[in-house]
Structures are given as structure tokens and as C-alpha cells.
Amino acid sequence: MQVYQKSNTFLKGLIDWGKNFDYSKYMGKLGMVKLLLRVGIAFVFVYAAVSMSLKPEEYSRYLPVLVKEFFPPTPFLHFFGIFEIILSLWLISGKWNLYPSILASATIFALTIVNLSEFNTLFRNVGIFFASLALIVLNLNYDEGQAKTR
Amino acid sequence: MKDKPKLAKIALRLSLAIAFGYAAIGGFLQPEIWLGYMPPFIATSPYAETVLMLFSGFEVVLTLWLLSGIWIKYAAIVAALMLVGIVGANITDMTIVFRDLALIFAAIALALLS
């Protein structure tokens, strides 16, 4: 009975702590916005990387003709998948946020430009590109602040 | 320095407005293609094209709302909910709609920023 009461008190305390936890003190609204954008963009890269590793034949149609001429599609897609995973991890890590944001936006831009014939599917990439621009702008803010404190 | 969240907000509004705007125009101009993204129970019904037109009309309204800059928080919430609905209805086409998940996060970010 005592164990039950103790665990009940502990659980209640834990719930109260969660309710009263001041997230903004640690992250702030801008921090949360940046995290959401980073996670969203990273998810797209991770999903594409995993998917193209599992079904390279489905993704080889997105490869530009020039790339197909010089490289065999499947190994190139595996290589590109690894690049996407590294980029996602970099985005999630939160280290030097500005640079993965620029790299992500350049990658999405390039992927869309070389596949304009698939625009009915890839029009969403334009939206993601603008989201990555928003991330760049927000990280410019952060990096300037950091630079000032250095 | 203070303008940066404002600039980010503009970029996020454009991000969502372009996605919804393009889909709306596509729905009006090439309904035969865009009907493929409707849930099967709608796509096979006799009212499929009417539903697509209504949906595209709503997307136009949402696009204009996002571009207008008025009550953006609510526009972003509506956009996020619509995107969740689109992903949910096309979960079997995840290789196409996985990109919408980034837009859902962008819409939540916009709601938070507004």
C-alpha cells in the first residue's frame, strides 16, 4: 500500500513537473520554429534516401540524362542517399545550422530544376525550398547573434 | 535583425501558398490527373469532378488567405490540417506525399511564428 502511495505521489509530481516545465526558457519560440523546419526538411531527405535505397528503379527516372550517361544509376542513387542521410543528420544535429540549411535549399532547388518534367509531383519541392529559405533567414539571425558574443 | 522572423514568415507563407496554388490550378486545368490523388471512394463516385473543383476552389481561397497576410495563424492551422488530410487520404502513395510532411511542419512553424 505504501509503495502504491509513493509511486502515485511520484507520478503526480512528474506530471506536475511536465505541466509546469517552461519550454520557452530553453528553446524560445524561434528555437521551436527552427526545430520544426529542420525536422520537416530532414524527414524529406531521410525518406527519399531510404526509399531510393530500397527501390532504386523507381527513383532512377529522377536522374538527369547527363548523370545516367556517366554513372550507373543504382550506385549513384546509393551515393546520393548517403549524402541525403548525412545532410539530414547535420540538420537535426543543430551544429552550424546555417550551412546545412543552405545545402538543403541548394539540393532541393537542383532536384526540382533537373526534373521539371515531373513538376506535377515535385511542385511540393518549391514549397520545401521556401521553407528552407525561411530556415536560412532564421539561422542568419542566430549566427549573427553568436558572432557578436564571440 | 528584427526583420528576420518577418522575412521567415513571408518565406513560409510563400512556401504554402505555392504548394496549394499549384495544386488548385492543376485541379482546374487537368482534373483527370488530379483525380488520381483523391481517396478512392471519392475518385470512383459520380461526383468526383465536382468534389475536385470544390476542393481546388477551397485551395485557391487558402492560397489567397496565406498571401493576404491576414489572420495568418489561422490560415497556417487550416493549411496544416488540410495537409494532414491529404497525406492521410494518400497514405498508400507515400513515395509522392512524403514531401507534404515537410509542408505540415512548415505550416506549424508558421502558426507558431504568427
Image (tube, rainbow, N blue to C red):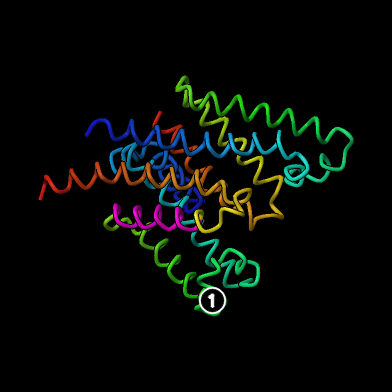
* Residue B36 point in image, percent of width and height: 76, 47
Which chain contains the residue that carries disc 1? A
Which residue is pictured at 31% across the width and 38% down the height? A28
Please, which residue is most extreme toward the right here? Answer: B46
Q: Is residue A108 above or below residue B109?
A: below
Position of residue A129 in the picture relative to residue A119 (left or right): left
Q: Which residue position holds label 1?
A: A69
Q: For numbered disc 1, what is the local secondary structure?
A: helix
* Residue B85 point in image, percent of width and height: 66, 40
Which residue is pictured at 44% across the width and 49% down the height? A6
Q: Quadrant of residue A104?
A: bottom left
| Residue B85 drawn in magenta | no
Closer-to-camera residue (A10/A119): A119
Q: Quadrant of residue A103?
A: bottom left
| Residue A109 drawn in magenta | yes
Q: Which residues are magenta?
A: A97-111
Which residue is pictured at 38% across the width and 47% down the height? A35
